[in-house]
Amino acid sequence: MKPEYDFKDAERGKFFRPGAVLRLPIYLEPEVQDYLAAKAQAKNIDLDDLVNELLKQEIRIAESLR
């Protein structure tokens, strides 16, 4: 690192976008991804749709057990 930085021409909030949605990357273990990818292909749906469907089911189950 430099001992000092010059921010005289900096612009506060230059890259801020109100309402921007951050989509977090989720990393699956290779064998889990392979299994789910095969299931998604068999259902003719995208992998992310299948994962969301499975997670929503798990949430419903967890909520019903409360």
Image: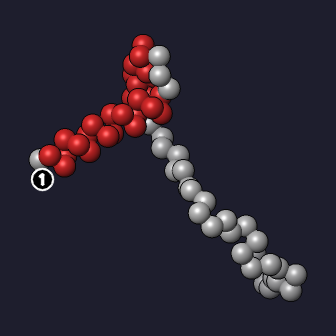
Q: Amino acid at mark 1?
A: Arg
62 to the left or right of 32: left
Q: Residue at x 73, y 67 (%)?
A: 15
Q: Residue at x 52, y 50 (%)?
A: 24
Foreground of the two, 19 or 66 = 19
Task: Establish if 17 lies above or below 55.
Answer: below
Foreground of the two, 38 or 64 = 64
x and y, in percent, of residue 49 in the image: 45, 32
Total tally of numbered discs in the picture: 1
- Of all residues shown, which one is farthest toward the top? 42
Foreground of the two, 57 or 2 = 57
x and y, in percent, of residue 55 in the image: 33, 39
Residue 35 in view (yes/no): yes
x and y, in percent, of residue 10 in the image: 82, 79
x and y, in percent, of residue 59 in the image: 26, 45
Q: Quadrant of residue 22?
A: bottom right
| Residue matched to label 1 | 66
